[in-house]
Structures are given as C-alpha cells and as structure tokens.
Image: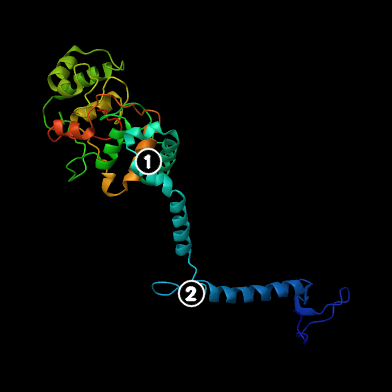
Amino acid sequence: MANDKPAAGSRLDEATGTQTVGHEWDGIEELDTPMPRWWLWALYATIVWGIAYVIAYPAWPMIDRATEGVLGWSSRGQLATEIAEQDKARAATVAALADMPIEKLTDNPALMRAAVAGGRAAFKVNCVQCHGAGAAGSIGYPNLNDDDWLWGGNLKEIEYTIIHGTRQPGGKDTHTSLMPAFGRDQMLTDGQISAVADHVLSLSGRAKPNATGAQIFADNCAACHGTDGKGDRQFGAPNLADAIWLYGGSKAQVVQQISNARLGVMPAWGGRLDPVTIKMLAAYVHSLGGGEAFAATAATPGETAAAQAGAAPQEAGDVRP
C-alpha cells in the first residue's frame, strides 16, 4: 500500500504517475504501487476465518491434548462415528457369519462373497507382512495361492490354522512338526546329506535318481514323508515330489534344510482377532485358488491333533526342505 508521506529520495514517475519508493539499482527504480483492493479484502477475510477456526475447532497444542474448540469436534471423534456407522451397516452380515458354521459357508454364495471381501481387508492388515500383498509368500513364508497344504486346505482346517498358529510358544493346540537337523546334530555325514538331497530333487525331476540317497531317505525320512516322498498330513510332513519349495529348491538350499532344519512360526490369531474376522480370513485364503473341498470322512483338525499325541496340525501353506 502506498505511503502517505513519500520516502526519502522518492519521486513521481512521469510515465505512470506513481510515486517511487526511493530505491534504485543500476538505473532501475521500484514503484510504490498500491495493492489491489480485492487482495486486501481476501487477506482480511483469511484473518477473520483463522480467528473463527481457532475458536471453533481444536487448534492450540497443549501438554497432553489440544484445545477442544466450542463445537466439540475432533478427528478421532469423527472417525469413531464413521466406524460405528460402518459397523451398523454390516451388522447383519457379521451376525450371519457368526451363526454360520464355516463348513456350511460355501452353501451360501452371497455370504461367502461377503466373507472373502472382509477377509481380503483383514489379510492386508494382519498377514501381508509375511505372506506378501498377493499371498505369494517368499523364501521362508508359504505361498497361499497354490494347492499345497501341510495340514489340509478346506475351510475348517484353514480356520484351525489361523486360530492356533504354527509352533506358537505356549499354545497347547498349535500345529507342531519337527524336522531333525541331520547335519548339525551329526546324524548324517556331508556325503550322505548330498546323496539324499539328490534323491529328494529327483522326486520332482530336478536331479537324476540316486540309489544311495534313496536308501538313506528310506531309513531316515520315509517315516514322515512317505516312501514316495509325497508327505503325510497327519504329521505335517510336506510333499517333496511336487516341486513346490518353501526354503528353495536348489541343491544347496535342500542341503541346507536337511543339515540345519528351519522351522517357521505363525502367530495364533485366536487371541488377537475375533471369530468372525478369523472366519473371513479363512474364506479369503480358501478363495485364492488352492482351497480344498470337505472330504466326507475327514477328521476335524482337533481330532487329528489328539491322534498325534502332541503333534497338532500346522500352518495353511507349504513347507519344503
């Protein structure tokens, strides 16, 4: 805004009729042009708006909270309101899922779709850290998209895995399987481990048959993995003949697993998530492509666990040497 009294050294610019501010740089002078009125009114309006905002809404930070504002609004309160509205909107679906036995879920396609959608959201919050955004896993973390399962891939079995986890410390019903460390514990020599690794790889066509390795496998591994290497879900022993690997399928990686077995841990989500969320997670994992139908005479996971005398079912996924 123009000054009422011209500054020292200022003059009236003949071309524009505007007073200069008295500064000059290399022959260039600055005009004391007044600001547009609309700009000034916009500035005054923002000042008034700012004062009103500070009074109406939380604004000034304090030690443990901010000033509340006369309207009593807060972002946390708005979030709580929106969550309550969403909970109310889906209350009927949640109630239906709670009442529906999971083995009957596929009989209701609409409810199954709702469960899969809810499970997808829950998976992104709780499971992607290990299994990945697409549930494809990585080295040491099972791929949930394939049809290879340690303890069964029907809805009930997947739900049991999510509830009780795998090797969950202190979990009496957790899935438990133990593979010996044949090298670390000096149960086999390096040469024997190399031979049995060749045999294991030959089961999926990745190496030539090895007679010595086959005999070592029969003596030390067949009790759990079966004589054909196709595993045994009763013991949580993985199928070694399908070329699906958790810790890698190269000769070096198979040798490493036989020598110094790695045993992953999956949390028991039963104490962390509500039953409906777990049911939705099971539906989502089942929908990824490898989910199995219920067998007419299949035992429940709990019954299988009791039959194993302490070796309970394990993680929905695949584990390989």
Residue labelled with disc 2: 60
Residue sitting at 21 percent across and 40 percent down?
A: 174
Q: Secondary structure at mark 2?
A: loop
Residue 131 is labelled as none
Q: Amino acid at mark 2?
A: Trp
Image: 295 above or below 264 = above
First-in-chain label (1 vs 2): 2
Quadrant in which residue 294 is drawn: top left
Residue 66 drawn at (x, y percent): 45, 72
**Furthest residue to the bottom?**
5
**Mark 2 surroundings: few (<14), some (14-19) or many (≥20) residues within 10 A:** few
Is label 1 in a helix, a strand or a loop? helix
Q: CA distance from mark 1 to mark 2?
A: 43 Å
Q: Residue 21 or 24: which is nearer the viewer?
A: 21
* Rendered location of residue 271, percent (x, y): 26, 49
Q: Are marks 1 and 2 in contact (CB under 8 Å)?
A: no
Closer to the camera: disc 1 or disc 2?
1
Identity of the residue drawn at 12% across and 32% down: 185
Colour approach in the figure: rainbow
Which residue in the structure is indicated by mark 1? Answer: 280
Residue 256 % position (x, y) = 23, 30
Disc 1 crowd rating (10 Å Cα; few below 14, some 14-19, many 20+) is many
Left or right side of 223 for 141: right
The front one of 267 and 141 is 267
Give the amino acid at mark 1.
Met
Against 104, is 212 above or below?
Answer: above
Looking at the figure, which quarter contains the C terminus? Answer: top left
Q: Nearer the viewer, residue 188 or 56?
A: 56
* Quadrant of res 194: top left
Q: Reply above or below: 249 against 57.
A: above
